Amino acid sequence: METSLICLAVALVGGLMLTRLTKLIHLPAVTAYLVAGLLLGPFFLGMLNIPGLGFNSLEQVEGFSIITQTALGFIAFAMGNEFRLSQLRSIGGRAITIGILQAVITTVVVDIVLIALHLCFPHIISIPCAITLGAIAAATAPAATLMVVRQYKADGPMTRLLMLVVAIDDAVGLLLFSVSYGIATALSNGQVSVLAVVVEPIVEILLSLSLGGLMGLLLHLVERFFHSRSKRMTLSVAFVLLTVGLSTMEFQIGPVHCGFSLLLVCMMTGTVFCNVCTTSEELMERVDGWTMPLNILFFVLSGAELDLQVLAQPVTLIVGIVYILARSAGKFFGANFSCRLTKEPKPIVDHLGITLLPQAGVALGMAQTAANLSDGALARNVVLFAVLVYELIGPSLTKRSLLAVGEIRPEGRTSARRHNAPKEAK
């Protein structure tokens, strides 16, 4: 236990200290946390095998999965706050159209490019692997986007649209992956499973939305018994922890395997709660402040979890570069086309696609499932390589895009220590 606590303390301090360096070169804090994780990971300081100084193995990093899962739950809960009815009435329809179209277009583009690569070089990648990677390409990392928006206090039409699109993107990506993975499995085994391709994905989404809605209503009903801000915040934290725990459950109903999507469940909890509780906005802000150390640990652990061994595999690098280029083109042109279709202003048309590039947790989870294919190891390694690239450059590109449309208000230069100090009596 003592070694684990020292590791977490070093991870927090290391991530914070590195932000001083990235601030000098105008990079987002998220990049600093990821780089700190890489440096503390098993391929750098962790190789020294000094107890408490870094993570000695990928297994040790995975041992902290409860922290990363919990952080994802709070991130999704906070994103649910963006789905307020007042906001949905104004941009909800456009966000849904853009969220669905850009995800589908990205999947189609990556599918076409990777299948073409298979036709040219059949020994490099199989069609099932290509189809699966196409679906994984649709997923966008909500955590990195949310952290950049918070750090720079971004606000405006594109920021509000972006938060909704990223949230919708995960639901669409989940459905696309389930269908594509079912088709890929059928191509590998020679038989199609209607349950895996159609029924189970729909059941998972419906169960996730139902559980999330129920937890949001319960949170509102229980929090009315408390008037203290600190007690209500504590209750909110407890409910998110409970929701994360429940969303990991799996069970069987006849032949149908049932499970939940952690992101969808927690997002729906936040959505329902923020729309039924009149004081939810103030409460959400207090919960966000409480979860900041948890979010830092999430990104440091994500950086430490990036497997640099994939860089030594030529096939992974070739397919990975093709995947990254195809996915980037799909996200950019997919968002560009869908924004033109919904008649968005030109700045949003030009820049929204770039903000959708970050990819991490959701894609890694999909890649873990894809590893069950005959050449699933290649799919997993390609996604690992892509995540390494996207997580390091994605937050900076998101920042640049929000800056280009004038929706970033940079952090002030005033020290919080001086700002909060009592004024001298004149």
Image (tube, rainbow, N blue to C red):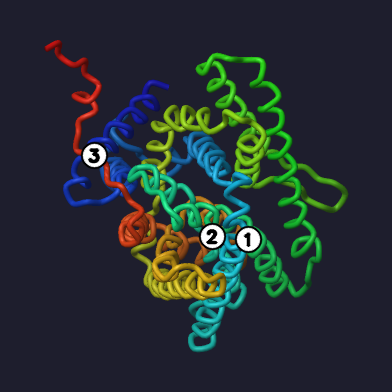
Q: Nearer the viewer, residue 416 or 276?
A: 276
Name the residue carrying label 1. Answer: 93
Residue at image point 52% right, 18% down: 229
Question: Could you tell me which quadrant the C terminus lies in?
Answer: top left
Q: Relative to residue 222, is residue 21 drawn left or right?
A: left
Give the crowd class for mark 2: few <14, some 14-19, many >=20 residues within 10 Å.
Answer: many
Disc number for residue 412: 3
Distance from Cα at disc 1 to Cα at disc 2? 20 Å
Residue at the image position 71 percent from the left and 32 percent from the top = 217
Q: Is residue 371 above or below residue 107?
A: above
Q: Residue furthest right?
A: 254
Q: Residues within 10 Å of mark 1 (few under 14, many from 20)?
A: few
Residue position for label 2? 139
Q: Residue at x 38, y 70 (%)?
A: 317
Q: Position of residue 46 (x, y in %)?
A: 30, 40
Q: Quadrant of the N terminus?
A: top left
